[in-house]
Image (tube, rainbow, N blue to C red):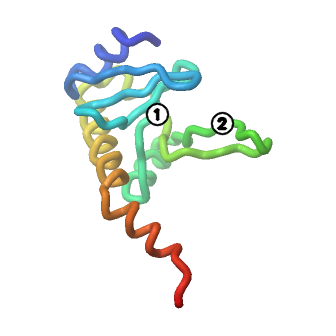
Amino acid sequence: MDSDYIADLFSAFGPVDVRRMFGGLGIYAEGTMFALVYDGAVYLKADEATIGTFRREGAAPFSYAAKNGRRAVMSYWRLPDRLYDDPGELARWAAEALATARRSAAPGRKAKARTARRPRR
């Protein structure tokens, strides 16, 4: 899967930037990574609010072998095969993945997580 194919695949969604990362590709819209490509499959960003939709489609999360020998699971879920041939529906899924990526990158979210980890005095 190359950059031109990915741009065409997401054309109904809008312009995307494709950047090499590790063994795959990151897909960005407006500077935010919302999808990745690995081993010929597209994975979209998901969270608690959207994972159910992926599960209903029989999709699985992206995972890889970590240095400690365990499987690491990321918050990206495999794009259902039917969406490769449905540009309009893919555009809706991509828009939701972009919104999810923006929510997860919200400044207050990281600050809240750091605050929650501080020991009480």
Work out whether 114 lies above or below 12: below
Helix, strand or loop at label 2? It is strand
User: Where does label 1 land, which residue?
Assistant: 43
Numbered label attached to residue 64: 2
Horizontal and vertical percent position of residue 107: 31, 58
- Given residues 59 and 68, the one toward you in this image is 68
Helix, strand or loop at label 1? It is strand
Query: Badge 2: how crowded within 10 Å, few (<14), some, or many (20+)?
Result: few
Work out whether 27 lies above or below 55: above
Kindly check if marks 2 and 1 are in contact, taking CB atoms under 8 A apart as contact: no
Residue in the image at 48% along x and 25% along y: 37
Number of marks in the rendered image: 2
Horizontal and vertical percent position of residue 38: 54, 24
Q: Nearer the viewer, mark 2 or mark 1?
A: 2
Residue type, label 2: Tyr
Residue in the image at 36% along x and 17% along y: 6
